[in-house]
Amino acid sequence: MCRLHQSLVNDLELALYQYGGFDWGFDPVAVLLYVAVAPGKTHATAEAAFDSVLAELTRTGPSAAELEKAKNSLTANFYKNYKTNNGTAQELARYKTLYDDYRVMYDYVPGVSAVTAEQVKEVMARYFKAKNSTTVVLVPEGGQS
């Protein structure tokens, strides 16, 4: 999520870093988005900014550059998984286990390439809602929230 990082870390300087991801499998999974709040900033301020940027991204969808960067990242990571014999074996096993056919993996890159900004926007609007969200704040012992 480039826009979240750019806004929270670079522009507003509310966070030290931001990242996210998910693991795919048989069961429904959560998209996990992390923000490390910068010293001297409150989690409430960072959370409000995060919510605002995510809401805007959900409303407008990704820009052409954001979508292209995401596609490039997903494609590069896909190929990196096959860099070693162990990685290749794990990926073959994953596709065989999840889809009962390892050849489904050949559809991944074309599938990523076919995704449109409008599709991303539609999926975000469907799932990225406050009622679907859980926020956890981790504060070190003796720290301030």
Image (cartoon, grey):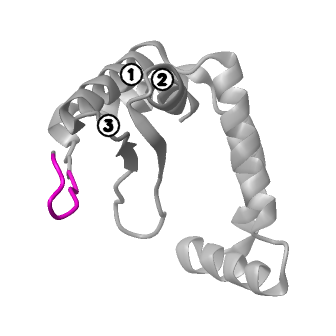
Residue 28 can be seen, yes or no = yes
Number of the label disc, if any, that sits on residue 7: 2
**In the image, what residue occupies the spot 77% across and 44% down?**
110
SS of the residue under disc 1: helix
Number of the label disc, if any, that sits on residue 53: 1
Q: Mark 1 belongs to which amino acid?
A: Val
The magenta stretch spans which residues? 137-144
Q: CA distance from mark 3 to mark 1?
A: 16 Å
Residue 92, percent from left and from top: 72, 78
SS of the residue under disc 3: helix
Q: CA distance from mark 2 to mark 3?
A: 22 Å
**In the image, what residue occupies the spot 71% across and 53% down?**
108
Q: Is residue 2 left or right of residue 45?
A: right
Q: Mark 2 belongs to which amino acid?
A: Ser
115 and 39: which is toward the camera: 39
Among the two numbered marks 2 and 1 on one chain, the one whose residue lies closer to the N terminus: 2
SS of the residue under disc 2: helix
Number of the label disc, if any, that sits on residue 127: 3
